[in-house]
Amino acid sequence: MNLKQGILDGDKRAVARLISLAENGDPEAFKVIKELFHLTGRAQIIGITGPPGSGKSTLTDKLAKELRKRGNTVGIIAVDPTSPFTGGAILGDRIRMQDLTLDEGVFIRSMGTRGHLGGLSKATHAAIKILDIYGMDYIFVETVGVGQSEVDIVKTADTTILVLVPGLGDDIQALKAGIMEIGDIFVVNKSDREDSDRLVTEIEMMLDLKQGDTTWRPPVIKTIASNNIGIEELLSKAAEHFDFLISSSLLKSKRIDRIESEIISISKERFIDIIYNNPDTSVSIRELSKEIYEKKLDLYSAVDIILNNFNRKGVGLC
């Protein structure tokens, strides 16, 4: 299969194959992305994050269906915990969105975290680019579940939706712990539950205290995703936020920040790979570790040895 031509022709199998290759670090995937990179940057990337049980997948499913009614195409990347048996994603999200898989205008991919921290998979950024090249109008990225270390979505999405639900007990505690900065839009899902109004009020009060450097105040939307309530309003606010980013030039700076972050991340991965696996530059880290253990060497000198060896060899990162 010619993957480059396949993705240009709208072949879903080519898209699925490319994402799998990217997950496995296969150079063929990155070769295609390089050649078609000029086609990226057209989709609005929307992050969906929130604690487990808040209804993120149901919300994503309803948002995608509403966008399809409007004639838009939708890509969905659902980041799941990694299966301890297969090493892949536990496919709960895709099962919940099963009827969407039959829609030609929707592409859903579950990805395991594979031990990557930050709430996303290591290959998430590559998958976003592939779906963008494929021509999706909207790309949803659903995280594993929010926590203090799961903030990569902010560096990935144009618009981040933080989903909370009344009655979990730790919603506001999570916000106080620093998650408050994540949301461009707050959603109180399952809002037919008791205390939903109280949760909305508490979020609004915390937003009053938030000191920001932009004029965007995150709206708080009540939804009952399972009954399709609040979905149109949520999409309207997502569009409003995207317009705000464009009109204030924040979209450009946000995307440049994202590119900078990706360059650093990819460079780190390649640098570490060269140190470990390139016979021209590698030194025995195992031997250095033994010397450190025996107090013949210290950690910082060992790193100096590795870097000096790398510099002497002068091997490129590509």
Image: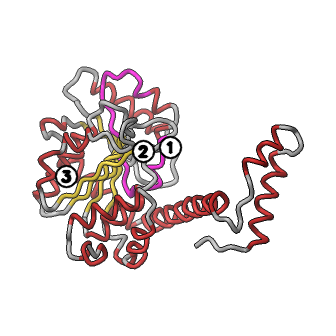
Q: Amino acid at mark 2?
A: Thr
Q: Amino acid at mark 1?
A: Leu
In the shown orientation, is residue 151 left or right of residue 197? right
* Residue at image point 83% right, 44% down: 291
Q: Residues at badges 1 and 2 in contact (C-beta under 8 Å)?
A: yes
Kindly indicate the quadrant of the structure image that contains residue 271. Answer: bottom right
In the shown orientation, is residue 252 left or right of residue 66? right
Q: Nearer the viewer, mark 3 or mark 1?
A: 1
Q: Nearer the viewer, mark 1 or mark 2?
A: 2
Label at residue 179: none
In the foreground, 90 or 174: 90
Kindly indicate the quadrant of the structure image that contains residue 125. Answer: bottom left
Residue carrying label 3: 64
x and y percentages locating residue 163 in the rendered image: 33, 38
Distance from label 2 to label 3 (Cα)? 23 Å
Residue 291 visible in the displayed image: yes
Kindly indicate the quadrant of the structure image that contains residue 201. Answer: top left
- Is residue 158 in the magenta section? yes
Residue carrying label 1: 117
Residue carrying label 2: 113
**Residue range (magenta):** 150-172
x and y percentages locating residue 91 in the rendered image: 27, 41
Residue 185 visible in the displayed image: no
In the shown orientation, is residue 43 left or right of residue 207? left
Distance from label 1 to label 2 (Cα)? 8 Å
- Which image quarter is the C terminus in? bottom right
* Residue at image point 84% right, 52% down: 301
- Which image quarter is the N terminus in? bottom left
Q: Residues at badges 2 and 3 in contact (C-beta under 8 Å)?
A: no
Q: Nearer the viewer, mark 2 or mark 3?
A: 2
x and y percentages locating residue 58 in the rendered image: 21, 40
